[in-house]
Image (tube, rainbow, N blue to C red):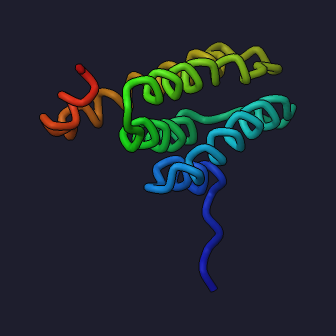
């Protein structure tokens, strides 16, 4: 019997899909998941969970073609921060953990971006 994957891993895999329809659906689910998960009193996200989601978001943008669609997706990703509801008022709010996950993901993945892919985004 196969082990059930964490919801973050499942979402990340769908976000990184090579099928655009799957990625779009995953973004909608992610928005709802972040909102629902962060409203639970039993806990928000851990740093590791957010890193898993960010890896999926990174490759979601990686797979997006055309500048206007990339810009639209970038806006959608940036507005995800507004779906966090930090109920337990921790020392390190979920919004900051989300931003930290973004920076860690860029640091980790930056050297893997090939020249042709980079040129695509600079046009």
Q: Position of residue 47 (x, y in %)?
A: 54, 33
> Which quadrant does the C terminus fall into?
top left
Query: Which residue shows up at 73% across the image and 23% down it?
Result: 83
Which of these two is toward me, 66 or 15? 66
Locate residue 90 relative to residue 66 in the image: left or right: right
Answer whether residue 97 is visible to the viewer in this image. Answer: no
Locate residue 14 relative to residue 43 in the image: left or right: left
- View extreme (bottom): residue: 1
Answer whether residue 34 is visible to the viewer in this image. Answer: yes
> Which quadrant does the N terminus fall into?
bottom right
Locate residue 47 relative to residue 58 in the image: left or right: right
Locate residue 59 relative to residue 30 in the image: left or right: left
Report which quarter residue 38 is drawn in: top right
Q: Position of residue 59 (x, y in %)?
A: 40, 43
Q: Position of residue 82 (x, y in %)?
A: 70, 17
Query: Which residue shows up at 39% across the image and 44% down it?
Result: 63
- Please tell me whether residue 20 is drawn above or below residue 61 in the rendered image: below
Query: Which residue shows up at 18% across the image and 28% down it?
Result: 119
Which of these two is toward me, 63 or 99? 63
Query: Which residue shows up at 36% across the image and 39% down it?
Result: 62
- Please tell me whether residue 104 is drawn above or below residue 20 in the rendered image: above
- Please tell me whether residue 17 is drawn above or below residue 3 in the rendered image: above
């Amino acid at each position: 019997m196969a082990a059930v994957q964490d919801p973050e891993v499942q979402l990340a895999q769908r976000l990184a899909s090579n099928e655009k329809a799957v990625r779009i659906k995953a973004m909608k689910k992610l928005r709802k998941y972040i909102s629902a998960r962060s409203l639970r009193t039993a806990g928000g996200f851990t740093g590791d969970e957010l890193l898993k989601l960010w890896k999926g978001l990174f490759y979601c943008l990686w797979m997006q073609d055309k500048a206007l669609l990339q810009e639209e997706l970038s806006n959608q990703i940036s507005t995800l921060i507004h779906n966090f509801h930090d109920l337990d008022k921790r020392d390190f709010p979920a919004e900051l953990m989300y931003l930290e996950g973004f920076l860690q993901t860029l640091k980790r993945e930056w050297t893997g971006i090939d020249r042709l892919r980079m040129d695509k985004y600079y046009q």
